[in-house]
Amino acid sequence: MCGIVGYIGNRKAAPILIKGLKKLEYRGYDSAGICTLNDKEVIIKKDIGKIEEIDKKISLTNLEGNIGISHCRWATHGAVTKENAHPHTDCSGKILIVHNGIIENYSELKSELEKKGHKFKSETDTEIIAHLVEENYKGNLKEAVLKALKRLEGSYALGIIHSEHDELIAARNESPLIIGMGDGENFISSDVPAILGDTKKVVYLDNKEIAVLTKDNVELFDLDGKKKDKKVEEIEWNAEQAQKGGFEHFMLKEIFEQPQVISETINGRLEDSDVLINDEIKLSEKEIKEIKRIIIVACGTSWHAGLVGEFMIEELAKIPVEVEYASEFRYRDPIVDKNTVVIAISQSGETADTLAALREAKKKGAKIISIVNVKGSSIDRESDSTIYTRAGPEIGVASTKAFTSQLVVLYLITVYFGKVKGVLPAEQVRNRVRDLRKLPLQMQSVLEENDYIKLHAKQFYKKTNALYLGRGINYPIALEGALKLKEVSYIHAEGYPAAEMKHGPIALIDKEMPVVVIATKDNITYKKVLSNIQEVKSRGGVVIAIESKGDEEVKKIVDHNLYVPENSYILTPLLAVIPLQLFAYYVAVMRGCDVDRPRNLAKAVCVE
Ligand code: F6R
């Protein structure tokens, strides 16, 4: 989704803004723009396309001036055109504005402002904010902004400057925005990576707050203009984590980071026969024993993690679980009460639908535990408790390391609940902890098959369709494998429960259809999956199997074998997903796709 970077200080603003904007590219965008103030002179440059291309065409980085705002736009209101790209201005051209979010009452405000003589240059909802500030401006920018904000309905993160003021104003409602505090300089940004190289001190703006930044000062106010004091927080991530570190793409780097990430996710949270998350989960043993139902809400890959979590929790902690698309949850008056725990899963912590689902559940009395990667994000702050995945910044749009770290957190919650509820005796807890500790090394061994997986990608990258099959706890992995392939390579792929194939999709099978089957060994679905493979084979399908190392049975009947080490049934998905991530990655690279920035996608989906 759109990204904002703003700067005020002693340095030249433009290079800092463009460097920051490039760090936000992963959020997804279609156009970009920048504006700086050079001694009251307003300089604006914007266009459609990638920042790099625009910079080459109209040179964004060499603008003069020490104050500026910049933006990358993911179109919501108005086509992808230069006119609709931000920054937008008022009639006088002195008020400049960048905006993330959606102003819901914009058409009503626009006709009101038009009647007063304001002339609009774009089709965006954003431009009305500049005119609304102009309408209220009587020499004090902050006062004008506060008056304008009172009229807005909808979501916004805003950066606003005026050519006659040495200040930068930031405002937030339902769209993330952070203030970075430097030495003799201050920043605003939609996300941490944009300012990570410049400062680690941040203030997270809350809804209906504004900040007035000068180069030496930051002041915060509520919408009534009342001054607020807020804690300055220290970012734990470092700048290197947001670099490619020698890899061709962030996606590949992040796939390879998984062993290290998982070690970090479990660090300090395990004892020989215990899981130490009671401080983070903030539920008493009594409350845990009283849980009657768990509802998991999430979107996309995080929803797939939820589906795996359902298997984990029901099998080991014996609590009934439902997994809901966050976007559907609140539109069907869900039955939720104080004995329901809602687990919200989100890498970014800003997914609008997940946030809305969380609020709906909270309103109905449920306790909210969130599994989040980005500290200080909206979902983190609005939950009763958060268990961080500790995956570090995930920049590749296709989620990889966040997914496996979410699964680890779900496993920690499962074992902890199972122990507290008395359904997992100490010996079993010990075994489960031991299984988990094996994962980082086992993941490493899957990654060592990288070249072998790449060779397989070479044989399939020209295909136009693919089917992914799995059963039980591996069905969500089939969904995830298919999602990874389609989002980065644009090949149509479907994930299906292996046995359901007979009820329709089997009609698709012929020698042109690669069928990826997760066929790892277990005592639950393995034999059945073998039969499903035979069904595909007898119709001429080409089968690529994810199988347990040393398994001879699957090997005999499939065309291509990708191996993963054996772990418990419950933890196998964390291993089985890695070859699928690598396969999707290499297929996409071979097809010449922009792997880290797939078309139309946004990293954090902050609109509903
Ligand atoms: C797919 C992907 C998306 C996200 C989804 C939810 O690779 O990344 O499907 O999983 O948009 O995002 P978060 O987890 O940030 O709530």
Image (cartoon, rainbow, N blue to C red):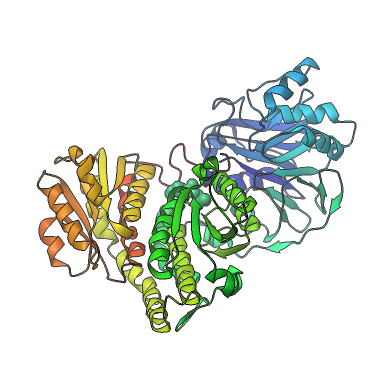
Left or right side of 113 for 107: left
In this view, the residue in front, 567 or 487, is 567
**Residue 427, horizontal then vertical, whole percent:** 39, 84
Q: Is residue 343 visible?
A: yes
Name the residue located 39 percent from the left edge and 62 percent from the top edge. 256
Left or right side of 416 for 125: right
| Image quadrant containing the N terminus | top right
Name the residue located 52 percent from the left edge and 41 percent from the top edge. 332
Q: Is residue 73 above or below residue 27?
A: above
| Image quadrant containing the C terminus | top right
**Residue 262, horizontal then vertical, whole percent:** 44, 68
In this view, the residue in front, 198 or 447, is 447
Q: Is residue 250 visible?
A: no
Left or right side of 523 for 95: right
The tally of labels here is 0
In this view, the residue in front, 454 or 416, is 416
Name the residue located 75 percent from the left edge and 52 percent from the top edge. 186
Q: Is residue 274 above or below residue 196?
A: below
Q: Is residue 531 above or below residue 278?
A: above
**Residue 203, horizontal then vertical, whole percent:** 72, 56
Q: Is residue 597 above or below residue 181?
A: above
**Residue 92, horizontal then vertical, whole percent:** 79, 24
Name the residue located 66 percent from the left edge and 28 percent from the top edge. 125
Left or right side of 15 for 527: left
Q: Quadrant of residue 60?
A: top right
In this view, the residue in front, 212 or 270, is 270
